[in-house]
Amino acid sequence: MKITTIRTQVVGLPNDEPLAGFSENPNATNPIVTLRIGTDDGIEGIGVTYFGGRLTGTLKRAVEELGALAIGEDPLRVEAVAAKLAAAASGAGPGGILTMALSAIDVALWDIKGKALNLPLWKLLGGGRDRIATYASGALRRGLKLEEAVTAAGRLRERGYRQAKMQLGLPGVTSPAREVEQARLIREAVGPDMDLMCDINQRWRVEQAIDIGRRVEDAGAGLYWLEDVTAHDDYPGLARVAEALATPVAGGEYLWGIVPFRHMLEAHSVDIVMIDQVRSGGISPWLKIAGMAEAFNLPVVSHGVPEIHVHLVGAVPNGLTVEYMPRLFRLFEEVPVPHNGDLVMPTAPGLGLKFNDETIRRFAVA
């Protein structure tokens, strides 16, 4: 089998929020680069990548230029293709647009491999379990009004979610007391039995994270984890927070490639390792990072794209839960749907995904 074609498209997806109905910015769009890799056997693999900013066109071009180097290669030799492409653009790495472009190609190659072997990706990767926990994400963002966030939290509870994520590090004029109030009211809205995660998105300094984190604990919010509490590469600072709090600290979504995870793990910076399939460089490096975390006796969780991450978190023995974020849902004909708080593993070969051609035509960006 040989790679014969590379096709890309930028799609500007609406910034809606279907889980609870409140969007921070309903007029915004999420630009996504789609990829289709064709083969001489007629098997097509798909991938996606995104930058979230004005360089999306540049990212699309990077996928095309790297993909052109893969023409004629055997798509089943994923590591060989990745090595060739990385070597061709080594001066642009190891992070940034190079890694994001490699990610889309790596994902599409794994999709081809699963289809060629007639296996869903999670089974191809080891088949750790047939279902995996998932948590609602994106519905309780910090940009919502307090009453909107509380209402949205109640809706998630009513809709049967067993895990959900909120955000602190509130915008505008805030204080530790205001942050604690947000956590306390959302905890009341979701009830005592829901696992409630909290994302800070690097908005606190180390001393703030320790101070507010302790206050939230004292208020009885009972957080499942605190995520990205301070600068992602302040490994000693993160370790100070993790040591000071009873609440587990999660982090890793902002790290690029494999090596930074080694530094984070060696510094004992986090209790839960979060891996972003796009920033890590695709499925291949994601699995290597998960294995590294397993060696440190730590669980792994995903960031975004549950359509792909369901396979990865479900395949590895230390997979904990999948972030159920609906940002890309419109892009596919069908996506995994939670049942009693879990995602059931897909049964179709490869990723088990098909692009929704009508969505791509409707929201295509010239």
Image (spheres, rainbow, N blue to C red):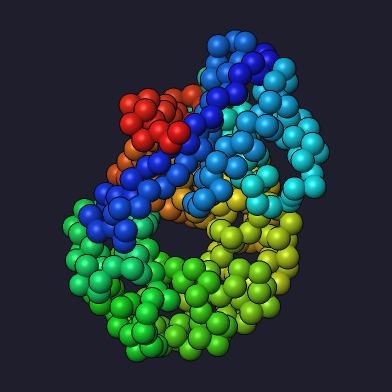
Seen as rendered, the residue at the extreme top is 41
Q: Does residue 312 appear left or right of residue 17 in this picture?
A: right
Q: Nearer the viewer, residue 342 or 283?
A: 283
Q: Which residue is depicted at the point 79% across and 44% down?
A: 90
| Residue 155 in view in this figure | yes
Q: Nearer the viewer, residue 86 or 316?
A: 86
Q: Check the picture and name the quadrant holding the C terminus.
A: top left
Q: Residue at x 55, y 16 (%)?
A: 43
Residue furthest front as drawn: 366
Q: Is residue 348 left or right of residue 78?
A: left
In this picture, residue 340 sits left or right of residue 304: left
> Is 74 situated above or below 67?
above
261 is higher (above) or lower (below) than 31: below
Task: Give the quarter of the figure containing the N terminus.
Answer: top right
Q: Is residue 256 left or right of residue 332?
A: right
Identity of the residue drawn at 64% across and 47% down? 97
Residue 148 is situated, as x and y percent measured from the top left of the image, at: 22, 67
Whether residue 134 is visible here, answered yes or no, is no
Count of numbered badges drawn on the protein: 0
Q: Residue 136 in the image: x percent, y percent?
A: 34, 55
* The one of 65 and 130 positioned closer to us in this rendering: 65
Q: Could you tell me which residue is drawn at 59 percent across and 60 percent down?
A: 254
Q: Position of residue 80 (x, y in %)?
A: 76, 30
Please provide percent x and percent y for residue 313. 52, 47
